[in-house]
Image: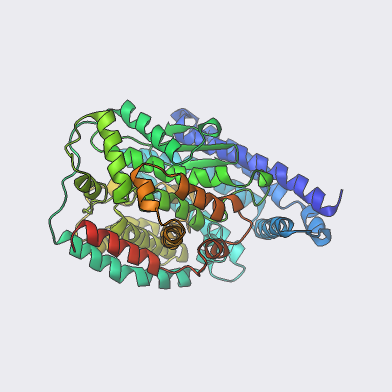
């Protein structure tokens, strides 16, 4: 056994335990009885304590000093282990366990406050979560920018200032496009009542069409759709709305994009540090390109309309071009996850700015609701009507995911770049989508992005797939061309 071999044995067991910890989170969102919340918090804290001890084991430092990589895979594994070791050592084990305990309990507090439309009931818990993440960020930053240190958990090497510049470049063209669309006539939405069982059945059909392997996964219901796991156990959740089947169908496709990334990583990397998606930005690029560029394309929408008629009968729309506009309907709304492509990033940019202010201390938790409502009115032109449509709508802050939100917009940027490269590589893509054939597109993404896992860094992964450095331009060009055609701009 070489030092590298010893290191990888230790890393595999750590990765396996991390998967078990993730399963606790999945269970909490889908099946756990409400009364188990406090106990689950203790269980999560205990598991985090074990993981933190393994990630800071002094032997890792000794092994890293002696280990030598013989190929790119070995070098990537050493890079990821070193990064995890150096970051984990900066965070006291007691703090890591307390964050796990508090955020596990906070999730239930948030869910109840959201159901009750009671921001005040959640704010004391949120204040505790923010304080813990500030403490963790300060430990990780070692005198540097605290928010950047937290962001690095989700998008290695990214800096908030650089993302702010990129998002600043997105905003003017997005706002102009939104205003042009909303100034004209709007398409009619679907009409009718859509049976939940039929929605879930069609969502499973779509998951299979996009390549999701149900023998290594499952689809359940949750308040907030998500994907959990890696390798041979990757689970997704969705939600249903009797008046809006698109909510279920496109949430499923979005999460299947995440799941496909995890399922399609090379099996040679299973339970190793590179056997997962490299960053949340790259992860989001897969979910967004599945959901938007592919599933919301006018071509695929025509195929989907036929399948919806088969499942639901009369849906109020019979013409493919009208259905494509309904799928891509731009309208005022409160909810980020239900937002159209044009306005989605504006929701994310607002959250990015607010959470940076929370972490820096420029915004007090007690003032969050007012700050959210003021910013929303300024950005979208109408007032928040209730907390579940405002600062209580997302689960992220309750579970401590400060630094996560900007990866959604970065993922959209990456998806725009990948779509440009995909169209160049597959000139017959539109005809494939019109037949409901996703194999060519998802196969290209599997080969160019997904199978590599974390072999390369995030930007390097996108650049290797596309052949050019990522920028916001392809996304903006795509949105203007697509919605310009749909809305006759």
Q: Is residue 84 left or right of residue 377?
A: right
Taking 143 as reference, is 290 above or below it? above
Q: Position of residue 438 (x, y in %)?
A: 43, 44
Figure quadrant of residue 156: bottom right
Q: Is residue 217 left or right of residue 487?
A: right
Pick whichever, 428 or 342, lies toward us. Answer: 428
Taking 250 as reference, is 195 above or below it? above
Residue name at image x 55 percent, y 36 percent: 24
Residue name at image x 44 percent, y 30 percent: 34
Taking 20 as reference, is 378 above or below it? below
Q: Position of residue 148 (x, y in %)?
A: 52, 66
Residue name at image x 42 percent, y 62 percent: 420
Image quadrant in which the C terminus is located = bottom left
Residue name at image x 35 percent, y 32 percent: 202
Residue 387 in sight from this viewpoint: no
Residue 259 in sight from this viewpoint: yes
Q: Position of residue 158 (x, y in %)?
A: 53, 66
Pick whichever, 141 or 233, lies toward us. Answer: 233
């Amino acid at each position: 056994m070489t030092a590298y071999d010893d290191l990888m044995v230790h890393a595999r067991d750590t990765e396996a335990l991390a998967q078990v910890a993730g399963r606790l989170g999945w269970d909490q969102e889908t099946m756990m009885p409400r009364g188990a919340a406090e106990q689950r918090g203790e269980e999560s804290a205990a598991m985090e304590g074990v993981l933190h001890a393994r990630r800071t084991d002094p032997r890792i430092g000794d092994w890293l000093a002696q280990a030598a990589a013989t190929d790119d895979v070995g070098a990537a594994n050493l890079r990821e282990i070193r990064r995890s070791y150096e970051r984990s050592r900066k965070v006291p084990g007691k703090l890591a366990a307390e964050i796990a305990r508090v955020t596990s309990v906070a999730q239930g507090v948030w869910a109840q406050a959201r159901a009750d439309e009671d921001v005040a009931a959640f704010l004391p818990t949120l204040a505790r979560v923010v304080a813990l993440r500030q403490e963790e960020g300060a430990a990780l930053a070692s005198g540097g920018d605290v928010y950047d240190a937290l962001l690095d958990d989700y998008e290695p090497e990214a800096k908030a200032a650089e993302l702010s510049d990129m998002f600043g470049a997105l905003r003017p063209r997005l706002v102009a496009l939104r205003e042009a669309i909303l100034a004209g006539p709007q398409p009619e939405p679907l009409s009718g009542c859509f049976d939940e069982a039929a929605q879930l059945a069609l969502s499973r059909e779509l998951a299979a069409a996009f390549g999701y392997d149900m023998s290594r996964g499952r689809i359940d219901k949750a308040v907030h759709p998500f994907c959990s796991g890696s390798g041979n156990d990757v689970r997704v959740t969705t939600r249903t709305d009797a008046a809006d089947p698109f909510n279920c169908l496109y949430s499923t496709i979005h999460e299947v994009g995440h799941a496909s990334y995890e399922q399609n990583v090379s099996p040679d990397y299973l339970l190793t540090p590179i056997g997962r998606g490299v960053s949340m930005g790259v992860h989001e690029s897969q979910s967004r390109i599945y959901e938007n560029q592919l599933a919301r394309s006018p071509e695929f929408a025509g195929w989907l309309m036929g399948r919806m008629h088969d499942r639901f009968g009369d849906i109020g729309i019979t013409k493919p071009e009208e259905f494509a506009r309904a799928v891509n309907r731009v309208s005022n709304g409160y909810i980020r996850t239900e937002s159209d492509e044009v306005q989605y990033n504006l929701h994310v940019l607002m959250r990015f700015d607010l959470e940076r202010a929370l972490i820096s201390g420029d915004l007090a938790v007690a003032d969050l609701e007012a700050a959210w409502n003021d910013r929303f009115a300024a950005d979208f032109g109408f007032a928040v009507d209730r907390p579940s449509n405002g600062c209580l709508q997302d689960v992220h802050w309750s579970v401590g995911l400060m630094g996560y939100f900007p990866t959604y917009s970065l993922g959209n940027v990456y998806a725009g770049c990948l779509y440009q490269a995909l169209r160049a590589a597959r000139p017959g893509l539109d005809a494939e989508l019109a037949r409901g054939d996703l194999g060519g597109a998802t196969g290209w993404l599997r080969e160019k992005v997904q199978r590599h896992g974390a072999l390369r860094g995030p930007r390097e992964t996108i650049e290797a797939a596309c052949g050019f450095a990522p920028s916001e331009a392809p996304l903006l060009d795509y949105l203007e061309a697509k919605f310009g055609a749909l809305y006759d701009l």
